[in-house]
Image (tube, grey):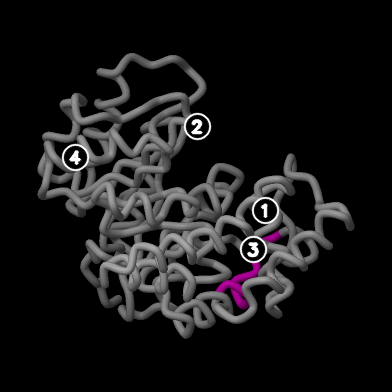
Amino acid sequence: MVKKEFLRSGLYSALITPYNKSGELDTAMLCKVIKHQLDKGVEGFYCCGSSGEGLLLSNDERKKILEVVLSEVSGQVPVVAHVGALSTRNAVDLARHAEKTGVCAVSAIPPIYYHYSQNEINRYYIDILQAIDVDLIVYNIPQFTGISFTAENPLLKNRRISGIKHTSMNLYDLERIGKAYPEKTLINGFDEIYASALAAGATATIGTMANICPKLHLKIRGAFLAGKNEEAYALQHRLNDVIQVFVNSSVFPATKYALFLQGFDVGQCRKPFAPLTQKQKQKINSAMNAIADVL
């Protein structure tokens, strides 16, 4: 297995998980989706995160997905495995498998449901790191977990915490982390603030929408880096028009339906996610048609 280093300035797809008609993993379709995204310019993959329905999968399924992704990618681009779990035992198990399989880094949400102390949460990350030799990217998603990571958290002093996936609207926290830890990679996690996150110091992004319109992300980044701010924000507005429809419909089912419109029958999201209504599908059809020129 060819291992590739994490790219500090990459566009990573928060890869979806395809299912067949029986609701089981569709690894053949997963390979097709990966190839398509590589052809469209995706520069890395983030497996079994929120978009990949990671917490709705068994550990065995998560391992299988990662093995398929790494085999299909074959060292062309870096792959990050999300290994976050309710228990340290499961997270460590996934992390050890990920390292053995050949990822460039692992990532993890904090442990959720029980109200752990900050020391307990930080210990969870340290336990993961002590079980492996690859670096870890903290997955900061307070909207889902109720836990925020800021520059004041001593966990970030750990040299093997190589970056933070900042899926939060609080760009002040992102900027402060970048100021305190310039050696760490700041990774944007919300597609709808990509241009703004770049201005706040993010150099990479891991996005759900990279599954369906990575070229638009690359155009936003290109315009921003060229100092064409008006163009970057105009492109961001176009992306956000689509995101608004997806959010109003249910983001992850909408993403899968958008892939279906592009010729990839990736199935529906697992329950308790509900199927989209016909009205929701019609709105997604219109939103996708509006960005057809940048797909």
Question: What residue is shown with label 4?
Answer: 130
Q: Is residue 178 left or right of residue 18?
A: left
| Circle 4 SS class | helix
For the residues carrying marks 2 and 4, which lies nearer the camera in this image?
2
| Circle 2 SS class | helix
Q: Which one is in front, 116 or 36? A: 36
The image position of residue 259, as x and y in percent, is: 66, 70
Q: Is residue 265 above or below residue 244?
A: below
Whole-number angstrom distance, CA of label 1 to CA of label 4 = 39 Å
For the residues carrying marks 2 and 3, which lies nearer the camera in this image?
2
Whole-number angstrom distance, CA of label 2 to CA of label 3 = 28 Å
Q: Is residue 81 above or below residue 172?
A: below
Question: Decide: marks 2, 4 in contact (CB < 8 A)?
Answer: no
Whole-number angstrom distance, CA of label 3 to CA of label 1 = 24 Å
| Circle 1 SS class | helix
Whole-number angstrom distance, CA of label 2 to CA of label 4 = 28 Å
Question: What residue is shown with label 1?
Answer: 246
Q: Which one is in front, 214 or 224? A: 224
Residue 257 among those drawn in magenta:
no
Residue at horizontal 48 percent and vertical 54 percent from the top: 191
Residue at horizontal 28 percent and vertical 52 percent from the top: 199
Q: Is residue 73 left or right of residue 40?
A: left
Residue 29 among those drawn in magenta:
yes
Whole-number angstrom distance, CA of label 3 to CA of label 4 = 31 Å
For the residues carrying marks 3 and 1, which lies nearer the camera in this image?
1
Residue, far bottom: 39
The image position of residue 262, as x and y in percent, is: 68, 77
Residue at horizontal 20 percent and vertical 37 percent from the top: 177
Question: What residue is shown with label 2?
Answer: 143
Q: Which residues are magenta?
A: 24-30
Whole-number angstrom distance, CA of label 2 to CA of label 1 = 17 Å
